[in-house]
Amino acid sequence: MQRPIVYDATHLVSRGRAIGAAGIGGVDLSYARHFAAHERFACGVHYGYPRPHVFSRERVAALLAEIAPAEDAEDGWPALREWLLGNEETPIAPRAAARGSRFGDLWRQTRRRLANDEPHVVPPSAIYLNIAQHACEFPLLFDWLARRPDVRSVFFVHDLLPLDRPEFFRPGYERLFRRRLDTILRHACALITTTHVVAERLRREFSARDTRPPPIHVQPLASSLGLADAADDHDDALAESAYCVAVSTLEPRKNHLLLLNVWRALAASGAPCPKLALVGGQGWENEQTLDMLRRCDALRRHVRHVHGLSPQSLRRLVANADALLMPSFAEGYGLPVVEALSLHTPAIVSDIPVFREVAQGRAVYLSPIDGKGWKEAILAVADRRGPRRLAAVAAARTFVPPRAASYFAGIEAFLDSL
């Protein structure tokens, strides 16, 4: 039996143009685009009480069209490229914000929150798909699932890091996340995640509750930047420039301070120093990182922070880099690692179980507190003829990238089994 698909669009409505292409927002957007175009797609839903509001196919399509990034939006790529080539010393401007007034965005969001299209109810025997966990901390909004035993509810669980590493999240977030997880585990007929590490952690959570887990489907996310088969990826000038790239939000868990301290030591050594491009938005409790970027003279010539790069610009940046760096203390997946290795770019990453899994052992692994080891590894990949660089490049070329087409084929097969 092929059940109709009902997609929870609450997060898309709430975030709007600020949804972003990374993290949970990026996954939510990719799922919504895929299933909104699917022949089995019945409707979207937005939370309400005592039952969710129903969004027609047309309303979901209009929402996705509105929050899609503009194809002609400017980003910081031209200035970043010139700086990497040594031709530009001026600060790099962030990508221009999406057009639209705050009032206009709020008005559109409010109208969507109140919308409720025909037939006003979730169709019988549907699969309810929730990717972003938005508002799951309010269990009352999900009680309708208990009153609809014909509906199979499927939730995407990205990780359980707020429970395991609460020090890396905002105060109080552990308690909020616990409420979200309680709602998910109470109603889920099935779960989707990206790694066996997270799946096993979920099984331990069910065991602690003395509850049998539902089916858990593990499927690694494919690179949003594509594979290393495009002829226009190679940039001769960039490929000859020594630089590394780190792609992640500036926040404590991502461990940018380690990289900045390594680069300060490299700059102070007097030896040739590769450049470092930090790509990502600003998260929370990043004052130390931002202070170093703004005030440390030793870093000024060697490190740049930019955000809002288009996918095409980010692809070219990563494809021509000496290495992708990701010294995170903890992760649920690590899409930038998959993106780099899919483009045959070496990756130097923290030696944590999730990176062992997603990188298939093809990365260079180091402790996230081993500053000396990171310094040596970075210099090694910058040495074009050195044995460690050649080994890292060879390892990246043997990476077997997850593919977008097979990803959703696997997801659909799992949903068909419910």
Image (cartoon, rainbow, N blue to C red):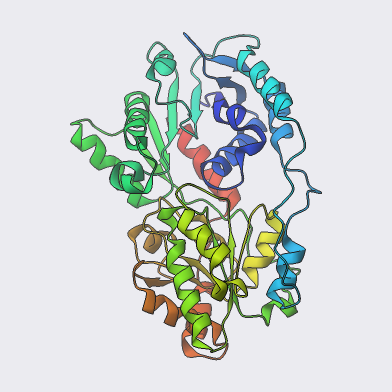
Task: Report whether 264 appears left or right of 29.
Answer: left
**Quadrant position of the C terminus in the picture:** top left
Task: Report whether 51 appears left or right of 143.
Answer: right
Q: Is residue 164 above or below residue 338?
A: above
Which one is in front, 34 or 326?
Answer: 326
Is residue 38 at least partly visible in the picture? no
Which one is in front, 230 or 234?
Answer: 234
Q: Residue at x 72, y 57 (%)?
A: 93
Q: Position of residue 97 (x, y in %)?
A: 72, 43
Is residue 114 at least partly visible in the picture? yes
Please tell me in which quadrant of the rendered image residue 82 appears. Answer: bottom right
* Number of marks present in the image shown: 0
Q: Position of residue 104 (x, y in %)?
A: 74, 25
Which one is in front, 240 or 116?
Answer: 240
Please tell me in which quadrant of the rendered image residue 153 appears. Answer: top left
Which one is in front, 320 or 218?
Answer: 320
Q: Is residue 169 above or below residue 133?
A: below
Most extreme residue toward the right is 72
Q: Residue at x 52, y 85 (%)?
A: 390
Q: Is residue 330 above or below residue 356?
A: above
Please tell me in which quadrant of the rendered image residue 115 appears. Answer: top right
Task: Report whether 313 appears left or right of 325.
Answer: right
Q: Position of residue 286 (x, y in %)?
A: 47, 53
